[in-house]
Image (cartoon, rainbow, N blue to C red):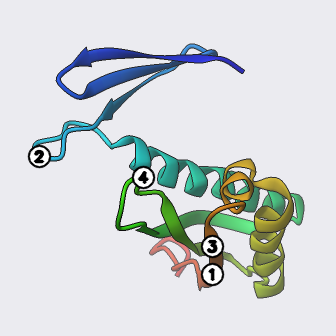
């Protein structure tokens, strides 16, 4: 895997992935125009885990309609201000979802599949939780 990051202006940089995608990073504390690098790491952990959870649930033939992960992180007070704690709370919505299957999917992501959070877990305390929501009936279905 390869990537590059190029300075754009001020504290703004553009990252280019080896797969041809671009993303903006902004290190400005005031008036930023994009996420900071640490926000990107936080979101990457959520995205990586979400991919796993949805994939595992689909393979288990669960009727997943939505998956959202709320992320919260704590950082060290002094430089380097690394993450010290990270919590991922999954809100999974679907039809006839099995709570056991959702729990299993979150656990498998945490323990086996999510490269980002597993990589971070060497120095960050990571916790997970989840809630299951039944899909609301649409007017057409009522």
User: Residue 71: image x %, image y %?
Assistant: 48, 67
Work out which quarter of the rendered image holds the N terminus and state it.
top right
Residue 53 in the figure: left or right of residue 112 = left
Determine whether the residue tagged by mark 3 lies in a helix, strand or loop.
strand
Q: Is residue 85 above or below residue 43?
A: below
User: Residue 23: image x %, image y %?
Assistant: 41, 27
Could you tell me which residue is drawn at 74 percent across and 67 percent down? Answer: 63
Q: CA distance from mark 3 to mark 2?
A: 29 Å
The tag earlier along the polypeptide, 3 or 2, is 2
Disc 3 marks which residue? 125
Q: Is residue 132 above or below residue 48?
A: below
Disc 4 marks which residue? 80
The tag earlier along the polypeptide, 2 or 1, is 2
Q: Nearer the viewer, residue 140 or 120?
A: 120
**CB within 8 Å, label 3 to label 2:** no
Mark 3 vs mark 1, foreground winner is 3
Disc 2 marks which residue? 30
Q: CA distance from mark 2 to mark 1?
A: 33 Å
């Amino acid at each position: 895997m390869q990537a590059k990051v190029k300075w754009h202006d001020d504290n703004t940089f553009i990252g280019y992935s080896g797969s041809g995608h671009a993303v903006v990073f902004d290190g400005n504390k005031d008036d930023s125009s994009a996420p900071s690098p640490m926000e990107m790491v936080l979101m990457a952990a959520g995205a990586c885990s979400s991919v796993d959870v949805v994939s595992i649930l689909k393979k288990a033939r669960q009727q997943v309609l939505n998956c959202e992960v709320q992320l919260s992180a704590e950082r060290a007070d002094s430089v380097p201000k690394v993450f010290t704690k990270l919590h991922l709370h999954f809100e999974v919505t679907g039809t006839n979802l099995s709570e056991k299957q959702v729990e299993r999917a979150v656990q498998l992501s945490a323990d086996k599949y999510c490269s980002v959070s597993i990589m971070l877990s060497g120095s960050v305390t990571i916790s997970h939780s989840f809630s299951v929501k039944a899909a609301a009936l649409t007017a057409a279905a009522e």
